[in-house]
Amino acid sequence: MTTRGIDDVVKPWDRQQMAARLARDIPEGWYVNLGLGLPTLIPDYIPEGREVVFHSENGVLGMGPVPPKDHVDTWLVNATKQNITLVKGASLFHHADSFGMIRGGHLDLCVLGAYEVAENGDIANWATSQNDAVPAVGGAMDLSAGSKRLWVLMEHTTKDGLPRIVSRCAYPLTAACVVKRVYTNLAVIDVTERGFEVLDMAPGVTLESLQACTEAKLRRVG
Amino acid sequence: MTTRGIDDVVKPWDRQQMAARLARDIPEGWYVNLGLGLPTLIPDYIPEGREVVFHSENGVLGMGPVPPKDHVDTWLVNATKQNITLVKGASLFHHADSFGMIRGGHLDLCVLGAYEVAENGDIANWATSQNDAVPAVGGAMDLSAGSKRLWVLMEHTTKDGLPRIVSRCAYPLTAACVVKRVYTNLAVIDVTERGFEVLDMAPGVTLESLQACTEAKLRRVG
Amino acid sequence: MIDKRVASIADAVAGVKDGSVVLLGGFGVVGQPQELLGGLIEQGARDLTIVSNNAGFGSPMLPKLFALGRVAKLICSFPRPTPPAFEELFKAGKITLELVPQGTIAERIRAAAVGVPAFYTPTAVGTRLAEGKEIREFDGRNYVMERALHADVALIQAWRADRWGNLTYRGTGRNFNPVMAMAASLTIVQTRHMVELGELDPESIVTPGIFVNRVVHVESPDPPPA
Amino acid sequence: MIDKRVASIADAVAGVKDGSVVLLGGFGVVGQPQELLGGLIEQGARDLTIVSNNAGFGSPMLPKLFALGRVAKLICSFPRPTPPAFEELFKAGKITLELVPQGTIAERIRAAAVGVPAFYTPTAVGTRLAEGKEIREFDGRNYVMERALHADVALIQAWRADRWGNLTYRGTGRNFNPVMAMAASLTIVQTRHMVELGELDPESIVTPGIFVNRVVHVESPDPPPA
């Protein structure tokens, strides 16, 4: 088998496959917060019968799927302000309690999107420059600093092909040294004390081709 | 009218009269926490129809009277661990919320007993020496430091006739500079920046006789 | 008789002073007290500091308050999407934005409510939102010191209320409301339902009446579908 | 299926290690989980630090734990009336008492639960309970710095629970229980009633199941009249 360029025979995971790949790794019983964008696809891929409890930082544990249009309770929204449902066993609480849960390390997992992840676990996902017109941070810093583990779900490179898995973040940090794992359209990569370790790759991706679009050094394990 | 000795024609207020004298000064709408002992007599003397809301630091607002013996819910107790009732409009909450209310200055009034009150508003009411066998403080320090106003309800002197209204507390402090008013069996005394000011005296008590059993300097106002 | 009920929105917001710090309940528009905001617009107080998780996108009233030039400062975690009224003022330097992580806003408000002047949090350590703030190490980890956020006024949306000001909320309309209700000198509530004293279960009251000053009954519409 | 229910008291308290810090719910005996305490006595862990508002006067179980010499330290606000078992050990210097104001205990436990390592409080400033602690001035007033109180185990008395560990309480049996339930690595609950998932109203759950590890159904008696 010869090494090929990444544009050649590679079949990157699509957005649904990325969400499904990550969902596979969430065991029963975890309490999970999902950030805006891609991570919101994850619940669809939790296997039937596996109980995972979804947290929404605006005061919900036990968030269920989007309701059918004719059965919407508009008093129920998630962090993205979409209407949601509650599953059996759900509970409601206020913002100080909700972020107490987050900051206190009670969430087993938070999955966020990001602009960049660095090999020391730094994450940059809230601002693309030092002078955004109207900056916004939401709960990203709380979730990053507080969760038991932070996984990032993002495209491996920018639309222009620039690396997002880097030795050091260029964008403003959301939190330092917190990311445990990165799921991209090309690979699953652990953040370890020894740097980035590749756990899994999309069909056709080789370590060499992956490295070619990754600024930080990668190692293959397992 | 001649000045007489305090043992002569004085009619000190008894415990019920002390509680009633203080109750008179609690306006409608105040949220009030009552300490152990004498202060627990106060609710009996709030005039019918005047709504005052009693707080118990173990998580109750809207504490009602002691229940008849055959209608006791033993899951309801006050800070003294006596069974209580709830009035209409009562609410229940946990200890961190309850002491948040206290510390955050939301109680209009706390009434405590004391060993000593000093002219700068210091209160000593939890320990009689530096080496009590098994010391206990409960919520006294939180209530003293946190309430909007702290009134003390106590006998004017010790059983041995020693003064308890002093220029400086000898016993370990509960809180510094917090007492606003003292109700005793002999007088009602404000704590002001100018020192103790006597507002009212029991029948037969004169400023001179009161001063004789008071270590700190008293002034008569009004 | 303790009766915190007031007859009108105008009575509810009467006396709000220029320069007030105003806590505004709601997450997006859910739990945001629109009619009280409308009352505040009518009432006329200026030079306000508004504490709100969002900048009013989708809100019928908050952008109006900005557009009228009544807000000097917004303390906020997520001012996006950004209503044009806010964006214009911001770009023109006519409004100050204090960007605070969402959990830190909530905890700073709670701290004010419970008499804690300052606390330490891991949130924002190592980021530009911690720049200039005191950093301190506890047990080998760094934390930022944050200060209590006191307010003059809180505007609250409740679901049920009684004349003592006991409150419950509905769904995620709870959000910042119970926290903010505890932290202001003047807590003003609009409630969808006014009930008799004693109707609310003492076990299920979320905001005890001690924190509330005024309650007005407003049959406001449900939030729009999102 | 998430199922935090365990079949017996022994299963509930299994694995508590020597030297553990144990948060014990209850105010006096109301809300104090007697059967879990009994289980802890049977289970055998030693050298414990117990965090409890009281020292067990009137409690069938806590004085036994003291008498068996299993407690090295009590963190407590009001150890009076003092059970003889505790008083003897204390006078003999065989147990340490850390006396903490009641609200400060509650807030230190909450701080641990919500990821706050330290905070400032006005309580105890100028008293001997603040001796040796950091004092700091904010806006002209002095405050004591207090540290979060983390624990290995919490023993909790609930009224209703489901298999996810969602809890409600009864009356003043609530007290420290919801605060302690949030702050331990292993939160063990005895509940008077076990209900089906979905039976508890999401609006009225006091302790969300995320904080709970094990729930055992015990038809314990009501507290005695007081």
Image (cartoon, coloured by chain):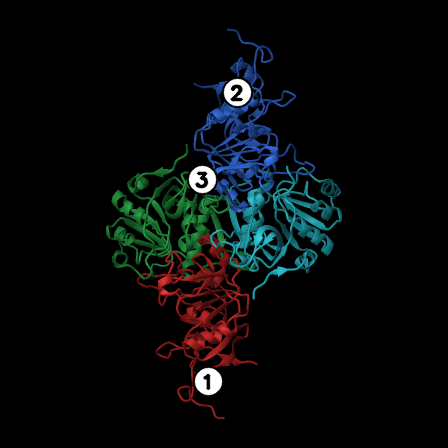
Chain colours: A blue, B red, C cyan, D green
* Residue B205 numbered mark, or none: 1
Tell me residue A22's x, y (percent).
50, 25
Tell me the crowding category of disc 2: few under 14, some 14 to 19, or many 20 or more residues within 10 angstroms, Cα based.
Answer: many
Looking at the rendered structure, the secondary structure element under dot 3 is helix
Q: Is residue B77 left or right of residue C202?
A: left
The answer to whether marks 1 and 2 mark residues whose Cβ atoms lie closer than 8 Å is no
Numbered disc 1: what chain?
Answer: B
Q: Are marks 2 and 3 on the same chain?
A: no
C36, above or below C4, in the image: above
Numbered disc 3: what chain?
Answer: D
Residue lying at 54% horizontally and 21% vertically, measured from the top left: A17
Q: Point out the residue furthest to the top here.
A: A1
Residue type, numbered disc 2: Ala
Looking at the rendered structure, the secondary structure element under dot 1 is loop
B213, above or below D2, in the image: below
Residue B119 visible in the snapshot: no
Instruction: Give the residue pinned by disc 2.
Output: A187
Looking at the rendered structure, the secondary structure element under dot 2 is strand
Residue type, numbered disc 1: Val
Q: Nearer the viewer, mark 1 or mark 3?
A: 3
Q: Is residue C155 left or right of residue D24?
A: right
* Residue D210 numbered mark, or none: 3
Tell me residue D154's x, y (percent).
37, 45
Residue B134 visible in the snapshot: yes
Tell me residue D144's x, y (percent).
47, 55
The answer to whether marks 1 and 3 mark residues whose Cβ atoms lie closer than 8 Å is no
Tell me residue C210's x, y (percent).
54, 59
